[in-house]
Each structure stands twice: as C-alpha cells, then as structure tokens.
Image (cartoon, rainbow, N blue to C red):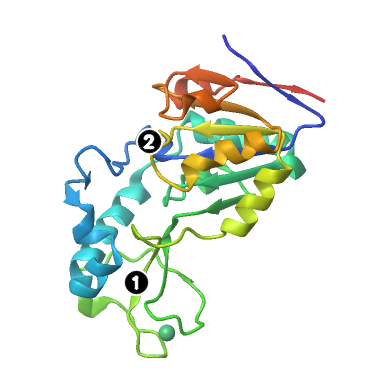
Amino acid sequence: MPAVSVSSADRVFVLTGAGVSAESGLPTFRAEDGLWAGFRVEDVCTPDAWRRDPAAVWAFYSARRAQGQSAKPNPAHLALAELEAQIPSRFFLCTQNVDDLHERAGSANLIHMHGELAKSRCEHECGSPPVEDRAVYAGLDDVPRCACGGRLRPHIVFFGEIPFEMPRIEREISLSTLMLVVGTSGNVYPAANFVHWARQAGARTVYIGPERPLNAPAFTEIVEGKAGEVMPGLFRIDN
Ligand SMILES: [Zn+2]
C-alpha cells in the first residue's frame, strides 16, 4: 500500500475535481464530447446561454440539485475530512465541484472555486450577496427576483467566467508544503496550473486518481487508483 506522509511541519493544500463527485454517482462535464449529463455545455453553462435561454439553464441546474441531494459522500470525501480533523489549522481544501459532498463529509475549511449548487445570486452585479437556495424550479416563473429586479441565477462559475477566490487560492498555495490533487485530469485552467505554482513554492505534489493526469511530470508522486479506494488509510501523520 502506498502512503503519503504528513509531518507536523506540513501545510496541506488539496484540490479536488470531478472524479471525486463521479465516484458518488454524480455525472460531470466531459471534455471529450462537451456534454454534461447529456446537455451541451454551451446550451446551459455559459453567460451566453443565460442571456439566451435562462429557462434551459435553470432546468439543467435544478436537475443537478435534485441529483446532488440524493448523492452521498464517498470514502474519498471522508478521508479528506479525517485528514483535516487531524491537522485543522494546516489544511485547506479547494474544490472544483459544485455539490456539497465535502461539507456533508465533515470538511470545514474549504472553498468552491467554481461555485455552489446550493446557492443562487442576482444576475446583476448589484451588490446583493449569494443566498442559500436548494430549490428545484419547475419553470422560470418560479425563480425569485432580487430587490433590484434582476433574476436569480445559479451561484455557479459558467464556462468563460472567472473562478471565485483566486487571490486566496494563490496565497494558500504559496504557503503550502504539500499539495494533493485528487480526481482532476489537468485539462481545466486555471486549476491545472496549481501544481506548477506549488512546485515553484517548493511543495511536494501528490496526484491521486484512476489515470495519469495530463500534467503528470509536475507531480513528485502519483497514486493511481480510484480516490475512494486508495485514500482511506493513505495518509501517515507524523506529529
Ligand atoms: Zn440584484
């Protein structure tokens, strides 16, 4: 069994991606055919799609919400929550996933760089903050409006929009001594660059996933396997 040692001096930055959600049965965007759960992403996940057909966008994300609520955290989510519990002040999780499976597994110090399914926000930049929203909308008429008159949109980073919290992510990477990249193939930017930033900062970099990532040479260690199968018991904490 491979082991990844985590010392008392280590500060851990974790990046998780679609593979981790897929192991809980949630379909994810596939770069090869441009489809996500059977939808073409340009029809449902872009600023242009929102302008053209907000009903289609909400139909898609309502379906994702319904599916997300029935999914359960898998052993990879639980292994990360367990690692965090052992080194709470030296652990930071950045996920590309929009579901809340990490939270439901017990992770606390995390950000969703591509947004959250369980939140909505005003379509305009009017200053209203995102709101908790798990509603599955039957049609556009059911979608609430903001005080400014704008329609609520999913609190999701559409393709072509800038990911959330990049300054904080960059700061956390620069402080980290160990980066774990789990279930993400290295073809979505800027996340695919994180490993390079970590290397520049002198960190060890470990990849965990079922196949070698596109950016494999950037890793000091590669653990090949499904995250839910290889992560339980993977970490050796030397305190
Ligand atoms: Zn507004």
Q: Position of residue 226 (x, y in %)?
A: 42, 23
Residue at position x 64%, y 33% in the image: 199
Q: Position of residue 9 (x, y in %)?
A: 81, 31
- How many C-alpha atoms fall within 10 Å of the one at disc 2: few (<14), some, or many (≥20)? some
From the image, state whether disc 2 or disc 1 is nearer to you: 1
- Answer with left or right where residue 118 lies relative to residue 32: right
- How many C-alpha atoms fall within 10 Å of the one at disc 1: few (<14), some, or many (≥20)? many
Q: Quadrant of residue 194?
A: top right
Residue at position x 70%, y 45% in the image: 174
Ligand 1, seen in the image, is in the quarter at bottom left
Give the CA distance from mark 2 to mark 1. 26 Å
Q: According to the image, label 2 marks what residue?
A: 24
Residue at position x 21%, y 63% in the image: 59
Q: Quadrant of residue 123?
A: bottom left
Residue at position x 46%, y 45% in the image: 101
Q: Relative to 184, does residue 125 appear above or below in the rendering?
A: below
- Answer with left or right where residue 156 lies relative to residue 234: left
Of the numbered discs 2 and 1, the one sitting upstream in the chain is: 2
Callout 1 amino acid: Arg
Callout 2 amino acid: Ser
Q: Relative to 67, does residue 60 appear above or below in the rendering?
A: below
> Which residue occupies the extreme top position in the image?
1
Describe the element under mark 1 as helix, strand or loop: strand
- Answer with left or right where residue 109 lies relative to residue 143: right
Does mark 2's beta carbon lie closer than 8 Å to ligand 1? Answer: no
Describe the element under mark 2 as helix, strand or loop: loop
Q: According to the image, label 1 marks what residue?
A: 153
* Disc marking residue 1: none
Q: Is residue 126 visible?
A: yes
